[in-house]
Image (cartoon, rainbow, N blue to C red):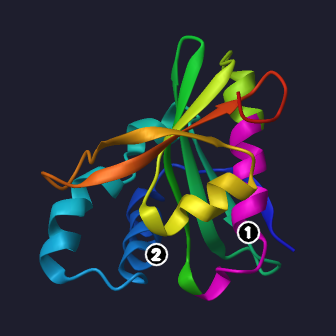
């Protein structure tokens, strides 16, 4: 069973390592990973602001994380990664649900998600609605699926 807690000061490097392992799991090459690294790096400032949550296994080991970035009535699911050994364990669903709670607590009415194509089916299962493709924030010329999740009803808007 995965439990969720706020990220702790000093965890940015180990959480970033989870992001990198998770992204690399999908077979991206070294150049892609190099270009992606700045966009999937966890910042200590986000941890200190309370915007990063960590999913932990029964032994307390971090197996995933989410970062929710508030912006008025909207929040962005800026990061969501599960360590490859925990993919398929339910950790992603638990982390997504925790991100929804955090976004609501931060005052958002909707959450937007610029997703990796490998995660598209997951976000659709969670109830997010595909809106359009948007440019990647990391890879020039790459387009990514962009989703919206209605936080007021708990389903896609």
Question: Disc count in the image?
Answer: 2
Instruction: Tell which of 83 and 13 is nearer to you.
Output: 83
Residue 56 drawn above or below residue 72 = below
- The disc at residue 91 is 1
Disc 2 residue crowd, few under 14, some 14–19, many 20+, Cα 10 Å: many
Residue 151 placement (x, y as % from top left): 75, 27
If you read the primary sequence from the N terminus, does the residue marked by circle 2 or circle 1 appear first?
A: 2
> Principal SS element in the magenta part?
helix
In the image, taking residue 9 as reference, residue 99 lies left or right, namely right
Q: Is residue 93 magenta?
A: yes
Nearer the observer, 111 or 134: 134
Residue beneath the point at 34% across and 86% down: 27
* Residue closer to the observer: 67 or 137: 137
Which structural element holds mark 1? helix
Question: Which quadrant of the figure has residue 103?
Answer: top right
Q: Position of residue 141 (x, y in %)?
A: 14, 52
Residue located at (43% from left, 84% from top): 25
Q: Residue at x 60, y 12 (%)?
A: 73
Q: Which residue is found at the position 25% from the left and 45% from the top?
A: 137
| Pointer 2 residue | 22
Q: Is residue 154 magenta?
A: no
The region drawn magenta spans 85-100
**Neighbourhood count class around disc 1 (C-alpha, 10 Å): few under 14, some 14–19, many 20 upward:** many
Q: Helix or strand or loop: what does disc 2 sit on?
A: helix
Query: Which quadrant would the N terminus be assigned to in this image?
Result: bottom right
| Picture layout, residue 57 above or below residue 5 | below
Task: Return the x and y of residue 143 as percentages of the image width and height.
Answer: 28, 51
Estimate the spatial distance between the alpha carbons at disc 2 and disc 1, rounded to whole Å: 13 Å
Image quadrant in which you'd find residue 45: top left
Q: Quadrant of the C terminus?
A: top right
């Amino acid at each position: 069973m995965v439990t969720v807690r706020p990220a702790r000061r000093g965890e940015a490097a180990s959480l970033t390592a989870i992001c990198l392992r998770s992204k690399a799991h999908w077979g991206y090459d070294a150049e892609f990973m190099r270009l992606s690294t700045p966009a999937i790096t966890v910042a200590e400032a986000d941890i200190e602001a309370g915007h990063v949550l960590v999913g932990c296994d029964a032994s307390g080991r971090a197996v995933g994380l989410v970062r929710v970035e508030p912006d008025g009535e909207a929040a962005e699911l800026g990061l969501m990664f599960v360590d490859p050994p925990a993919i398929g364990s339910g950790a992603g669903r638990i982390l997504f649900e925790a991100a929804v709670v955090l976004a609501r607590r931060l005052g958002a009415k909707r959450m937007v998600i610029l997703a990796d194509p490998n995660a598209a089916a997951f976000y659709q299962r969670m109830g997010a609605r595909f809106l359009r493709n948007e440019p990647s924030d990391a890879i020039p010329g790459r387009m990514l699926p962009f989703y919206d999740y209605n936080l007021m009803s708990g389903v896609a808007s």
